[in-house]
Image (cartoon, rainbow, N blue to C red):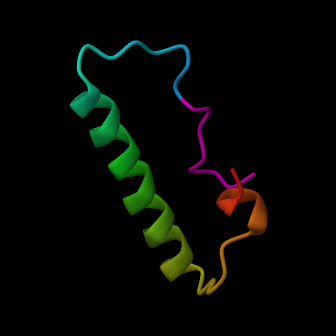
Amino acid sequence: RLHFLRRIRDEKKFEKAQDLVKVMQNDVKTAEKYFKENKISQIPICLTEK
């Protein structure tokens, strides 16, 4: 696993949908930074599949 990945926040309850979206956007920013810093051009398929 990559260090920035976390469980989808089943344990955490959000009062508003916007709160969840904010957390997800932060995860995306962290992932982008990680890939850029480590010069990774492809995202592993396990991260892109639903």
Q: Using the image, determine if residue 9 lies above or below residue 50.
A: above
- Out of 20 and 27, give the one closest to the viewer: 20
Where in the figure is residue 14, as x and y percent of width and height?
A: 33, 17
Specify whether 3 is left or right of 32: right
Where in the figure is residue 36, as x and y percent of width and height?
A: 49, 81
Residue occupying the point 66% across, 62% down: 48
Q: How many marks?
A: 0
Q: Quadrant of residue 15?
A: top left
Q: Which residues are magenta?
A: 1-8
Residue occupying the point 23% across, 21% down: 16
Residue occupying the point 22% across, 33% down: 18
Q: Using the image, determine if residue 46 lies above or below residue 32.
A: above
Q: Using the image, determine if residue 45 lies above or below residue 4.
A: below
Specify whether 45 is left or right of 14: right
Specify whether 9 is left or right of 5: left
Dominant secondary-structure state across the stretch colored magenta = loop
- Out of 45 and 12, give the one closest to the viewer: 45
Most extreme residue toward the front, as rendered? 50
Residue 2 is one of the magenta-drawn residues: yes
Residue occupying the point 35% across, 39% down: 23
Q: Using the image, determine if residue 5 lies above or below residue 39.
A: above
Q: Quadrant of residue 6?
A: top right
Where in the figure is residue 50, as x and y percent of width and height?
A: 69, 50
Specify whether 12 is left or right of 49: left
Residue 7 is one of the magenta-drawn residues: yes
